[in-house]
Image (cartoon, grey):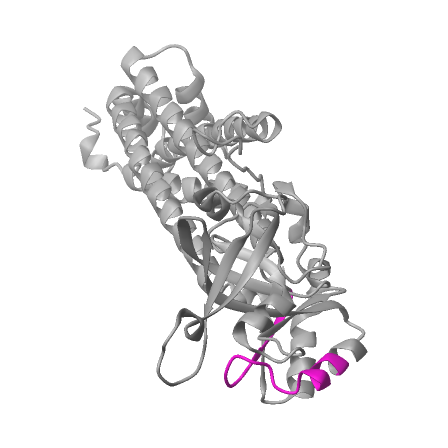
Amino acid sequence: MKNTAFYIATRYLLARKGSTAVTFITWLAALAMMVAVTAMFIIISVFSGLEDLNQDLISNLHSDITLKSNKGKTLPDIDKATKILSSNKDIAHYSKVIEEKVYIKFRENGDIANLRGVDSAYTMVNPIDKNIFYGNYPSFKYANEVLIENKLDNRLAIPVGESSDYAQLLMPRPGKGLVTKEEDIFNTSDIFVSGVFPGNDQLDNTIISPLELSQQLLNLPKNSAYEIVIKLLNPENTDLVKADLEKSLGKGYIVKTKSEENAAFWKMINTEKLFIYLIFALVIFITTFNLAGAIIILQLDKKEQAKSLLSLGMNMRSLRNVYFYTGLLIIFFGLVSGLILGTGLSYLQMETGFFKAGQNTDLPFPVRIRLMNYFIVGGTALLFGTLVSWIFSKINKANISLN
Protein backbone atom coordinates (compact mmCIF):
# COMPACT_ATOMS: atom_id res chain seq x y z
CA MET A 1 0.00 0.00 0.00
CA LYS A 2 1.26 3.42 -0.97
CA ASN A 3 -0.02 5.16 2.20
CA THR A 4 0.74 2.37 4.66
CA ALA A 5 2.93 4.61 6.85
CA PHE A 6 0.25 7.30 7.04
CA TYR A 7 -2.47 4.73 7.80
CA ILE A 8 -0.44 3.23 10.65
CA ALA A 9 0.27 6.74 12.00
CA THR A 10 -3.45 7.54 12.14
CA ARG A 11 -4.09 4.26 13.92
CA TYR A 12 -1.38 5.08 16.49
CA LEU A 13 -2.98 8.45 17.11
CA LEU A 14 -6.65 7.47 17.13
CA ALA A 15 -6.73 3.88 18.34
CA ARG A 16 -8.08 3.47 21.86
CA LYS A 17 -5.99 0.41 22.62
CA GLY A 18 -2.41 0.81 23.80
CA SER A 19 -0.46 2.32 26.63
CA THR A 20 -2.36 4.89 28.67
CA ALA A 21 0.88 6.85 29.21
CA VAL A 22 1.51 7.09 25.44
CA THR A 23 -2.05 8.25 24.81
CA PHE A 24 -1.79 10.85 27.56
CA ILE A 25 1.56 12.23 26.37
CA THR A 26 0.39 12.29 22.75
CA TRP A 27 -2.76 14.28 23.45
CA LEU A 28 -0.90 16.46 25.94
CA ALA A 29 1.44 17.48 23.10
CA ALA A 30 -1.56 18.24 20.89
CA LEU A 31 -3.24 20.25 23.67
CA ALA A 32 -0.05 22.23 24.35
CA MET A 33 0.24 23.08 20.66
CA MET A 34 -3.40 24.15 20.59
CA VAL A 35 -2.91 26.52 23.54
CA ALA A 36 0.29 28.00 22.06
CA VAL A 37 -1.33 28.55 18.64
CA THR A 38 -4.42 30.10 20.23
CA ALA A 39 -2.33 32.52 22.31
CA MET A 40 -0.16 33.54 19.35
CA PHE A 41 -3.16 34.10 17.08
CA ILE A 42 -4.96 36.25 19.66
CA ILE A 43 -1.87 38.39 20.38
CA ILE A 44 -1.15 38.98 16.70
CA SER A 45 -4.83 39.84 16.13
CA VAL A 46 -4.64 42.34 19.01
CA PHE A 47 -1.59 43.96 17.43
CA SER A 48 -3.45 44.14 14.11
CA GLY A 49 -6.25 45.92 15.95
CA LEU A 50 -3.76 48.29 17.60
CA GLU A 51 -2.31 49.12 14.18
CA ASP A 52 -5.75 50.07 12.90
CA LEU A 53 -6.51 52.06 16.06
CA ASN A 54 -3.23 53.99 15.85
CA GLN A 55 -3.80 54.63 12.18
CA ASP A 56 -7.23 56.09 12.94
CA LEU A 57 -5.81 58.25 15.73
CA ILE A 58 -2.96 59.74 13.70
CA SER A 59 -5.25 60.27 10.73
CA ASN A 60 -6.49 63.30 12.69
CA LEU A 61 -2.92 64.51 13.11
CA HIS A 62 -1.17 63.94 9.81
CA SER A 63 -2.58 64.59 6.38
CA ASP A 64 -2.01 62.70 3.13
CA ILE A 65 0.74 65.16 2.15
CA THR A 66 2.51 67.89 4.14
CA LEU A 67 4.46 70.82 2.70
CA LYS A 68 7.30 72.37 4.72
CA SER A 69 10.00 74.91 4.06
CA ASN A 70 13.41 73.67 3.01
CA LYS A 71 15.05 76.58 4.87
CA GLY A 72 13.69 77.99 8.11
CA LYS A 73 10.17 77.55 9.41
CA THR A 74 8.07 79.99 7.37
CA LEU A 75 6.95 78.80 3.93
CA PRO A 76 8.41 80.87 1.07
CA ASP A 77 6.23 82.42 -1.66
CA ILE A 78 3.07 81.00 -0.14
CA ASP A 79 0.74 82.68 -2.65
CA LYS A 80 2.40 80.83 -5.52
CA ALA A 81 2.16 77.55 -3.60
CA THR A 82 -1.57 77.95 -2.91
CA LYS A 83 -2.23 78.67 -6.60
CA ILE A 84 -0.42 75.47 -7.56
CA LEU A 85 -2.42 73.49 -5.00
CA SER A 86 -5.73 75.00 -6.13
CA SER A 87 -5.05 74.03 -9.74
CA ASN A 88 -4.14 70.42 -8.92
CA LYS A 89 -7.13 68.18 -9.68
CA ASP A 90 -5.91 65.40 -7.35
CA ILE A 91 -6.10 67.65 -4.27
CA ALA A 92 -9.44 67.76 -2.44
CA HIS A 93 -8.58 70.26 0.33
CA TYR A 94 -5.59 71.98 1.88
CA SER A 95 -5.02 74.03 5.03
CA LYS A 96 -2.34 76.33 6.41
CA VAL A 97 -0.80 75.45 9.77
CA ILE A 98 1.54 77.10 12.28
CA GLU A 99 2.82 74.87 15.09
CA GLU A 100 4.96 76.11 17.99
CA LYS A 101 5.59 75.55 21.70
CA VAL A 102 3.77 77.94 24.06
CA TYR A 103 3.30 78.40 27.79
CA ILE A 104 -0.32 78.27 29.01
CA LYS A 105 -1.34 79.66 32.37
CA PHE A 106 -4.65 79.57 34.25
CA ARG A 107 -4.81 81.08 37.73
CA GLU A 108 -2.07 79.33 39.73
CA ASN A 109 -1.52 76.52 37.23
CA GLY A 110 0.69 76.49 34.16
CA ASP A 111 2.19 74.10 31.62
CA ILE A 112 4.11 73.98 28.33
CA ALA A 113 1.80 73.14 25.43
CA ASN A 114 1.96 72.63 21.70
CA LEU A 115 0.02 75.40 19.94
CA ARG A 116 -1.31 74.42 16.54
CA GLY A 117 -2.76 77.35 14.63
CA VAL A 118 -5.00 76.29 11.75
CA ASP A 119 -7.35 77.94 9.30
CA SER A 120 -11.06 77.21 8.89
CA ALA A 121 -10.40 74.52 6.24
CA TYR A 122 -8.38 72.35 8.64
CA THR A 123 -11.24 70.00 9.52
CA MET A 124 -11.66 69.22 5.81
CA VAL A 125 -8.13 67.79 5.87
CA ASN A 126 -7.95 66.35 9.41
CA PRO A 127 -11.45 65.84 10.90
CA ILE A 128 -10.42 66.39 14.50
CA ASP A 129 -13.80 67.99 15.21
CA LYS A 130 -15.40 64.52 15.09
CA ASN A 131 -13.55 63.39 18.25
CA ILE A 132 -14.51 66.18 20.64
CA PHE A 133 -15.23 64.95 24.20
CA TYR A 134 -17.42 67.90 25.14
CA GLY A 135 -17.87 71.48 24.08
CA ASN A 136 -17.57 72.70 20.49
CA TYR A 137 -14.95 73.11 17.81
CA PRO A 138 -13.81 76.79 17.49
CA SER A 139 -16.16 78.84 15.33
CA PHE A 140 -13.25 80.94 13.94
CA LYS A 141 -15.27 84.10 14.56
CA TYR A 142 -12.75 85.03 17.27
CA ALA A 143 -8.99 84.61 17.12
CA ASN A 144 -8.73 83.57 20.79
CA GLU A 145 -11.26 80.69 20.70
CA VAL A 146 -9.40 77.37 21.10
CA LEU A 147 -9.80 73.61 21.42
CA ILE A 148 -7.67 71.94 24.11
CA GLU A 149 -6.45 68.40 24.72
CA ASN A 150 -8.24 66.58 27.56
CA LYS A 151 -5.33 65.78 29.91
CA LEU A 152 -3.92 69.29 29.59
CA ASP A 153 -7.34 70.73 30.44
CA ASN A 154 -7.65 68.42 33.45
CA ARG A 155 -4.26 69.48 34.82
CA LEU A 156 -5.00 73.17 34.48
CA ALA A 157 -8.71 72.88 35.44
CA ILE A 158 -9.82 75.39 32.78
CA PRO A 159 -13.62 75.76 32.55
CA VAL A 160 -14.99 74.93 29.10
CA GLY A 161 -17.52 77.19 27.40
CA GLU A 162 -17.51 79.84 30.13
CA SER A 163 -16.68 83.28 28.75
CA SER A 164 -15.89 84.73 32.20
CA ASP A 165 -12.83 82.49 32.68
CA TYR A 166 -9.85 83.00 30.39
CA ALA A 167 -6.51 81.23 30.30
CA GLN A 168 -3.43 83.01 29.04
CA LEU A 169 -0.85 82.00 26.41
CA LEU A 170 2.71 83.30 26.67
CA MET A 171 5.04 83.12 23.66
CA PRO A 172 8.72 84.17 23.98
CA ARG A 173 9.22 87.37 22.00
CA PRO A 174 12.11 87.35 19.48
CA GLY A 175 14.55 90.25 19.55
CA LYS A 176 17.64 91.70 21.18
CA GLY A 177 18.43 94.29 23.80
CA LEU A 178 17.99 94.85 27.51
CA VAL A 179 14.89 93.41 29.18
CA THR A 180 13.26 95.92 31.54
CA LYS A 181 9.75 94.55 31.95
CA GLU A 182 7.72 91.38 31.43
CA GLU A 183 6.19 92.70 28.21
CA ASP A 184 9.68 92.64 26.66
CA ILE A 185 9.93 88.88 27.21
CA PHE A 186 6.56 87.46 26.11
CA ASN A 187 3.78 88.09 23.67
CA THR A 188 0.57 87.22 25.51
CA SER A 189 -3.04 86.52 24.62
CA ASP A 190 -6.11 85.53 26.63
CA ILE A 191 -7.89 82.45 25.28
CA PHE A 192 -11.39 81.06 25.60
CA VAL A 193 -11.65 77.22 25.65
CA SER A 194 -14.66 76.19 23.54
CA GLY A 195 -14.11 72.41 23.63
CA VAL A 196 -11.96 69.45 24.67
CA PHE A 197 -10.67 66.59 22.50
CA PRO A 198 -8.96 63.28 23.43
CA GLY A 199 -5.19 63.11 23.14
CA ASN A 200 -2.72 60.36 22.32
CA ASP A 201 1.07 60.01 22.24
CA GLN A 202 1.34 62.60 19.47
CA LEU A 203 -1.51 64.91 20.50
CA ASP A 204 -0.77 65.29 24.22
CA ASN A 205 -0.65 68.90 25.46
CA THR A 206 -1.98 70.24 22.16
CA ILE A 207 -4.06 73.38 21.70
CA ILE A 208 -5.92 73.91 18.41
CA SER A 209 -6.41 77.61 17.66
CA PRO A 210 -7.24 79.86 14.71
CA LEU A 211 -4.21 80.65 12.57
CA GLU A 212 -4.48 84.37 13.43
CA LEU A 213 -3.69 83.70 17.11
CA SER A 214 -0.41 81.94 16.25
CA GLN A 215 0.54 84.73 13.85
CA GLN A 216 -0.08 87.36 16.53
CA LEU A 217 1.93 85.55 19.20
CA LEU A 218 4.85 84.96 16.83
CA ASN A 219 4.75 88.40 15.20
CA LEU A 220 4.26 86.83 11.77
CA PRO A 221 2.64 88.41 8.69
CA LYS A 222 -1.03 87.66 8.12
CA ASN A 223 -0.50 85.38 5.12
CA SER A 224 2.27 83.24 6.66
CA ALA A 225 2.37 79.57 7.67
CA TYR A 226 4.84 76.89 8.74
CA GLU A 227 3.10 74.04 6.91
CA ILE A 228 0.39 73.30 4.38
CA VAL A 229 -1.46 70.04 4.96
CA ILE A 230 -3.22 68.37 2.04
CA LYS A 231 -6.06 65.87 1.63
CA LEU A 232 -6.15 63.96 -1.66
CA LEU A 233 -9.18 62.79 -3.60
CA ASN A 234 -7.52 59.39 -3.92
CA PRO A 235 -4.83 58.58 -1.30
CA GLU A 236 -3.56 55.76 -3.54
CA ASN A 237 -2.09 58.45 -5.83
CA THR A 238 0.02 59.94 -3.02
CA ASP A 239 3.40 59.14 -4.59
CA LEU A 240 2.36 60.52 -7.97
CA VAL A 241 1.02 63.75 -6.45
CA LYS A 242 4.15 64.10 -4.33
CA ALA A 243 6.39 63.85 -7.40
CA ASP A 244 4.24 66.40 -9.25
CA LEU A 245 4.32 68.88 -6.33
CA GLU A 246 8.09 68.53 -5.90
CA LYS A 247 8.49 69.46 -9.55
CA SER A 248 5.99 72.35 -9.43
CA LEU A 249 7.03 73.92 -6.10
CA GLY A 250 10.78 73.69 -6.59
CA LYS A 251 13.61 73.28 -4.09
CA GLY A 252 12.17 75.73 -1.57
CA TYR A 253 9.67 73.14 -0.34
CA ILE A 254 9.90 69.73 1.32
CA VAL A 255 7.03 67.41 0.36
CA LYS A 256 6.31 64.53 2.77
CA THR A 257 3.66 61.81 2.67
CA LYS A 258 1.78 60.54 5.74
CA SER A 259 4.00 57.45 6.00
CA GLU A 260 7.13 59.60 5.84
CA GLU A 261 5.80 61.95 8.53
CA ASN A 262 5.15 58.94 10.80
CA ALA A 263 8.20 56.85 9.86
CA ALA A 264 9.59 56.71 13.42
CA PHE A 265 6.16 55.92 14.89
CA TRP A 266 5.50 53.00 12.54
CA LYS A 267 9.05 51.73 12.97
CA MET A 268 8.39 51.53 16.72
CA ILE A 269 5.06 49.71 16.18
CA ASN A 270 6.60 47.22 13.75
CA THR A 271 9.55 46.60 16.07
CA GLU A 272 7.21 45.84 18.98
CA LYS A 273 5.18 43.52 16.75
CA LEU A 274 8.36 41.72 15.63
CA PHE A 275 9.51 41.16 19.22
CA ILE A 276 6.08 39.85 20.23
CA TYR A 277 6.13 37.48 17.25
CA LEU A 278 9.61 36.21 18.17
CA ILE A 279 8.56 35.65 21.78
CA PHE A 280 5.53 33.57 20.79
CA ALA A 281 7.51 31.77 18.10
CA LEU A 282 9.87 30.75 20.90
CA VAL A 283 6.86 29.58 22.95
CA ILE A 284 5.71 27.39 20.04
CA PHE A 285 9.25 26.08 19.57
CA ILE A 286 9.44 25.11 23.25
CA THR A 287 5.99 23.53 22.97
CA THR A 288 7.27 21.24 20.20
CA PHE A 289 9.51 19.53 22.76
CA ASN A 290 6.29 17.93 24.03
CA LEU A 291 5.93 16.61 20.51
CA ALA A 292 9.49 15.25 20.58
CA GLY A 293 8.72 13.48 23.85
CA ALA A 294 5.54 11.99 22.40
CA ILE A 295 7.39 10.60 19.36
CA ILE A 296 10.16 9.09 21.51
CA ILE A 297 7.67 7.49 23.93
CA LEU A 298 5.70 6.15 20.95
CA GLN A 299 8.84 4.58 19.49
CA LEU A 300 9.62 2.85 22.76
CA ASP A 301 6.04 1.68 23.25
CA LYS A 302 5.67 0.37 19.70
CA LYS A 303 9.09 -1.28 19.52
CA GLU A 304 7.68 -4.81 19.21
CA GLN A 305 5.28 -3.69 16.47
CA ALA A 306 8.20 -2.06 14.64
CA LYS A 307 10.02 -5.41 14.67
CA SER A 308 6.97 -7.10 13.16
CA LEU A 309 6.65 -4.45 10.44
CA LEU A 310 10.31 -4.83 9.49
CA SER A 311 9.90 -8.63 9.44
CA LEU A 312 6.97 -8.24 7.03
CA GLY A 313 9.15 -6.29 4.62
CA MET A 314 8.67 -2.64 5.58
CA ASN A 315 11.87 -0.67 5.02
CA MET A 316 13.37 1.76 7.53
CA ARG A 317 12.30 4.79 5.52
CA SER A 318 8.64 3.78 5.73
CA LEU A 319 8.97 3.01 9.44
CA ARG A 320 10.48 6.44 10.05
CA ASN A 321 7.61 7.98 8.08
CA VAL A 322 5.16 6.35 10.50
CA TYR A 323 6.58 8.39 13.38
CA PHE A 324 7.02 11.46 11.16
CA TYR A 325 3.36 11.39 10.06
CA THR A 326 2.28 10.83 13.66
CA GLY A 327 4.08 14.03 14.66
CA LEU A 328 2.50 15.91 11.75
CA LEU A 329 -0.97 14.72 12.72
CA ILE A 330 -0.42 15.94 16.29
CA ILE A 331 0.74 19.32 14.96
CA PHE A 332 -2.17 19.51 12.51
CA PHE A 333 -4.72 18.82 15.24
CA GLY A 334 -3.18 21.40 17.59
CA LEU A 335 -2.89 23.97 14.78
CA VAL A 336 -6.44 23.64 13.44
CA SER A 337 -8.08 23.51 16.86
CA GLY A 338 -5.90 26.42 18.06
CA LEU A 339 -6.83 28.60 15.07
CA ILE A 340 -10.52 27.80 15.52
CA LEU A 341 -10.39 28.60 19.24
CA GLY A 342 -8.31 31.75 18.66
CA THR A 343 -10.71 32.95 15.97
CA GLY A 344 -13.69 32.33 18.26
CA LEU A 345 -12.16 34.23 21.19
CA SER A 346 -11.05 37.10 18.94
CA TYR A 347 -14.49 37.37 17.38
CA LEU A 348 -16.06 37.31 20.85
CA GLN A 349 -13.85 40.24 21.92
CA MET A 350 -14.74 42.14 18.74
CA GLU A 351 -18.45 41.71 19.39
CA THR A 352 -18.58 42.20 23.16
CA GLY A 353 -15.44 44.21 24.04
CA PHE A 354 -15.28 42.24 27.28
CA PHE A 355 -11.55 42.83 27.93
CA LYS A 356 -10.73 46.52 28.50
CA ALA A 357 -7.46 48.30 27.71
CA GLY A 358 -7.17 49.58 31.30
CA GLN A 359 -8.86 49.65 34.70
CA ASN A 360 -10.23 53.17 34.36
CA THR A 361 -11.26 53.12 30.74
CA ASP A 362 -14.15 51.80 28.70
CA LEU A 363 -11.93 51.29 25.65
CA PRO A 364 -11.88 47.55 24.79
CA PHE A 365 -8.74 45.87 23.52
CA PRO A 366 -8.87 46.34 19.75
CA VAL A 367 -8.83 43.10 17.75
CA ARG A 368 -8.61 42.69 14.00
CA ILE A 369 -8.76 39.26 12.32
CA ARG A 370 -6.69 39.25 9.13
CA LEU A 371 -5.96 36.49 6.64
CA MET A 372 -2.24 37.13 7.02
CA ASN A 373 -2.48 36.25 10.73
CA TYR A 374 -3.51 32.71 9.82
CA PHE A 375 -0.51 32.34 7.51
CA ILE A 376 1.91 33.72 10.11
CA VAL A 377 0.71 31.48 12.94
CA GLY A 378 0.15 28.44 10.75
CA GLY A 379 3.54 28.79 9.04
CA THR A 380 5.38 29.13 12.36
CA ALA A 381 3.71 26.09 13.93
CA LEU A 382 4.18 23.94 10.83
CA LEU A 383 7.83 24.95 10.47
CA PHE A 384 8.83 23.98 14.02
CA GLY A 385 6.48 20.99 14.14
CA THR A 386 7.73 19.53 10.85
CA LEU A 387 11.36 20.07 11.83
CA VAL A 388 10.98 18.38 15.22
CA SER A 389 8.93 15.51 13.76
CA TRP A 390 11.54 14.91 11.07
CA ILE A 391 14.48 14.97 13.50
CA PHE A 392 13.00 12.67 16.12
CA SER A 393 11.55 10.20 13.62
CA LYS A 394 15.08 9.28 12.51
CA ILE A 395 15.36 6.02 14.42
CA ASN A 396 18.36 3.76 13.85
CA LYS A 397 17.86 0.18 12.68
CA ALA A 398 20.47 -0.94 15.20
CA ASN A 399 18.11 0.15 17.99
CA ILE A 400 15.51 -2.39 16.82
CA SER A 401 16.64 -5.95 17.32
CA LEU A 402 14.86 -8.59 15.25
CA ASN A 403 15.88 -11.42 17.56
Residue 264, by quadrant, is bottom left
Residue 103, by quadrant, is bottom left
Q: Relative to 113, say whether 56 is above or below.
A: above
Q: Is residue 329 among the parts visible in the rendering?
A: no
Horizontal and vertical percent position of residue 213: 60, 66
User: Viewer-proximal residue, 319 or 74?
Assistant: 74
Specify whether residue 79 is painted magenta: yes
User: Viewer-proximal residue, 201 or 191?
Assistant: 191
User: Viewer-proximal residue, 121 or 24?
Assistant: 121
Left or right: residue 105 versus residue 137 is: left
Left or right: residue 22 versus residue 272 is: left
Magenta segment boundaries in residue numbering? 64-83
* Residue at 32% over, 35% down: 288
Left or right: residue 305 versus residue 166 is: left
The quarter of the image holding the C terminus is top left
Residue 198, by quadrant, is top right
Horizontal and vertical percent position of residue 134: 63, 40
Specify whether residue 72 is painted magenta: yes
* Residue at 50% over, 83% down: 72
